[in-house]
Amino acid sequence: MSAVVGPETGIAVTPAVPAGAGVRRRTSFRAVFGLAVLLLMSGAAIAAPRIAPWDPGRQMLAKRLRPPAWQARGLREHPLGTDHLGRDILSRILYGGRISLGVGVSAVTLSACLGVSLGLLAGFHGGRTDALIMRVVDVFLAIPYILLAMGVVFALGPSLLNVILVMAVTRWVQFARIVRADVLSLREREFVAGARARGNRSLRLLLRHVLPNALTPIIVVATLELAFMIIYESALSFLGLGVQPPTPTWGWMLSDGRNYVATAWWLATFPGLAIMLTVLAVNLLGDWLRDTLDPRLRV
Amino acid sequence: MPPPLLAVERLQTHFPTSRGVLRAVDGVSFTLERGEVLGLVGESGCGKSVTSLSIMRLVPPPGRIAAGRVLFEGEDLFAKDDEAMRRVRGARIAMVFQEPMTSLNPVFSIGDQIAGAVLAHAGGGRRAAWEHGVAMLDQVQMPSPRQRARDFPHQLSGGLRQRAMIALALASGPAVLIADEPTTALDVTIQAQILDLLRRLQAERGMAVLLITHDLGVVAELCHRVAVIYAGRIVEIAPVRSLFARPLHPYTRGLLQCLPHPSRFGQPLTTIEGVPPDLRQVTAGCRFAPRCVHVIASCRTTEPALEEREPGHFVACPVLR
């Protein structure tokens, strides 16, 4: 971008801060890596019916608990091995990504919308609005979220949409708290007072002057929450409240494989790896996004 | 005589505290004519800034405007509903704050912010608003305004930020500019440049300016008239020459004697003994009496009213003649 203006001005320009270029290169590496992994993951999940070698639900008991292909008893047609019912792990990971990524992303989006709006409201208005919202937050924090989720799912029935709703409704407080804390300090800043003195409406103050300045922690929380949501979904599935087996999800595969971890490590390892890679990619992308959106950190 | 552009009448702004009501502004009245620069001078905590925030109806809670009126173009601002008041802010009465470092939104370019201000009041297209913003930056003598419009606040120096702030405040062509210590955070050379700029813009636009400052040098530079405020009350209000030539209130005299002067070279600077009164305790009589060297018995019992000694020169002190 700006480092290569030297030639056209005809003056030999040595970059004043050589480290700056390094920072930018690392920045774009993070973005490219994160984006590539995420695209790969979601692409694979979307294309699962076309690229998966097996039906994820097909049980072949003769080939149960086979290790990955490169190991001694491994089979070429099951690159990542099979589980205790003889189902192909690679196929299950590909299909599982559809649920895990889909549910994770929608739940985080929904919970962010809810939490950010309520956090903005609480922090900006203060007084009774703040007290009311924050007491609700306290209640949500005090009740174990799994318990809350159980109650709601029992009442509404375990459908995919309900699971997403429950996950969002039990986790919005994470966003609300962090946003409120930021808004409390932002609203006292002079540029907000100045914007008010220029006759901006409250809504505009919030959306244009307060929210953009509170974006950094929101992005960080969102990336962390995505990882949490994937695990959360598995916990709900494990309790029979989430997506029902035999539909494969990463979280379910992980908790299912736990029983065999001493004898058949690949059952839990590969879905775990999928979750880890996704979270890593999202975090890297989030990091990069944060730096790009913050003009002070832009090179 | 036409009515003044802005008239503040017996304004009282109070802040409830745990130890009684703090009367930050207690009966302040003044007028601002079209095209006039009025200085509001006083020490920290005397109610200068609260007066300006009261005019804009932006007193931070729990503070509240307890009494008085502010007439702007003949209309009582305190009687307007919130939406009507919002349309006055920025469009008709604009403010420039003291701290240029924190008064601009850090995540938008200054061009964006000025364009936003234009759009909020004048409407029109984004492109036109941006061009207007560039023109405004040019008017405040921002070097290469077209490039600078794309800069973010952190990329500008303090002086340039204050220029951007002024451009932002003037973008919608206000009739009154309230400048709250616009040069306090700047170093001396930049201060002079900003004052020059304000004077030029004021003259070009025929805009009225309420300049809030504690710096008598700034007052002498820029103002037509000065109001000296002490402990929430105006003690003296006069044309700038008259005030500097013949200050009639002991507090004003004290302030002027605090300034270094060639004729007093080598002598230590004078100070005003004591501290301003606690604004939570209302006392009878003149508020300056405890610190006043000319104090007489009646000062402690009756509150002096402003009286006109010379044409346009009002003072609230019956002792000094």
Image (cartoon, rainbow, N blue to C red):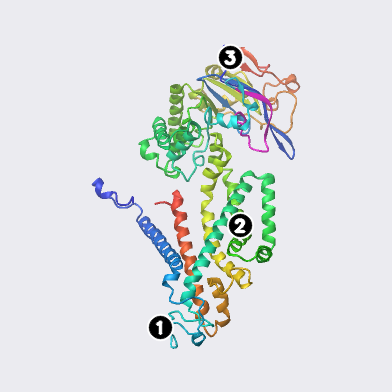
Relative to A132, residue B5 above or below: above
Residue to which mark 3 is pinned? B312
Image location of residue B161, percent across then percent down? 45, 38
Disc 3 is placed on an element classified as loop
Q: Which chain hosts label 1?
A: A
Q: Looking at the image, which is closer to me, A136 or B303? A: A136
One can see residue A132 in this view? yes
Disc 2 is placed on an element classified as helix
Number of marks present in the image shown: 3
Quarter assignment of residue B16: top right
Q: Looking at the image, which is closer to me, A179 or B30? A: A179
Viewer-nearest of labels 3 and 2?
A: 2
Local crowd at mark 2 within 10 Å, few (<14), some, or many (≥20)?
A: many
Question: Three-letter amino acid code at disc 3?
Answer: Gly
Q: Looking at the image, which is closer to me, A278 or B196? A: A278
Question: Three-letter amino acid code at disc 1?
Answer: Arg
Local crowd at mark 3 within 10 Å, few (<14), some, or many (≥20)?
A: few
Residue to which mark 2 is pinned? A172
Measured in 3D between alpha carbons, the distance from the residue under mark 1 to the one under mark 2, in whole angstroms, is 45 Å
Q: Does the segment drawn in magenta span residue B63?
A: yes
One can see residue B178 in this view? no
